[in-house]
Amino acid sequence: MSASSSNPLVTLITGGAKCGKSSHALKLAEAAGDKRYFLATAEARDGEMVERIRRHREERGASWNTIEEPLEVVGALSPLPDGAVVIFDCVTLWLSNLMMKHGENAEPIEREIRRFNEFLLASRQRIFVVSNEVGMGIVPADPLSRLYRDLAGTANQSIARTAGNVILMVSGIPVNIKQAW
């Protein structure tokens, strides 16, 4: 595939916090096939995250193979078989993890975003990418938060170009923005 093309097997599901992105990804993925993988980027660093992770696992149920990888997303997805159904949840947590590793040095993070998009373009897996729209609110007051918002916006734009399908979740309602299927 050329750099200007998109992959119809990739769906980006984006929206604000708690708008139903992950639940909708589960619904679509469960209808897409039986070889299911869930790539989780969250790390249980506090009690709240422990509880969120528990609830997400419970919602998925036993029919999912869970892969926990906070940083090396392409390395975690690459060995999965062609035709696998994958949910990658979520881009913004992944970016947060990368920022914790690299600080304000955007270059290695941008490199990982490009690497991920190259993987998505070539993928033969059915991938549902979940991400947050963090730039729809107020402008962050500090430089690090603004960098995070900017990196998330850059990542979402590039993934949306790569994805054959883009869904914006609004108050639990999926709105198709781009549709290849």
Image (cartoon, grey):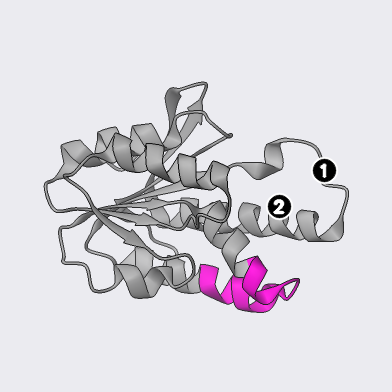
Taking 164 as reference, is 74 above or below it?
below
Image quadrant containing the N terminus:
bottom left
Q: Quadrant of residue 24 in the image? A: top left
Residue at horizontal 31 percent and vertical 61 percent from the top: 67
Residue at the spot 23% in from the left edge and 59% down from the top edge: 125
Q: Which corner quadrant holds the C terminus?
A: top left
Task: Work out whether mark 1 precedes mark 2 in sequence or the reverse, and give the earlier one.
Answer: 1
Residue 3 is left or right of residue 109, and the answer is left
Is residue 112 inside the magenta stretch? yes
What residue is drawn where x is 48% and y is 50%?
A: 160
Membership of 176 in magenta stretch: no
The reply to whether residue 1 is visible in this rendering is no
Q: Disc 1, disc 2: CB below 8 Å? A: yes
| Amino acid residing under circle 2 | Arg
In percent of the image, x 46 and y 22: which residue is there?
172
Image height of 139 relative to 8, above or below: above
Q: Is residue 66 left or right of residue 100?
A: left
User: Pointer 2: what residue?
Assistant: 149
Residue 177, horizontal then vertical, whole percent: 46, 35
73 or 154, which lies in front? 73
**Secondary element at tag 2:** helix
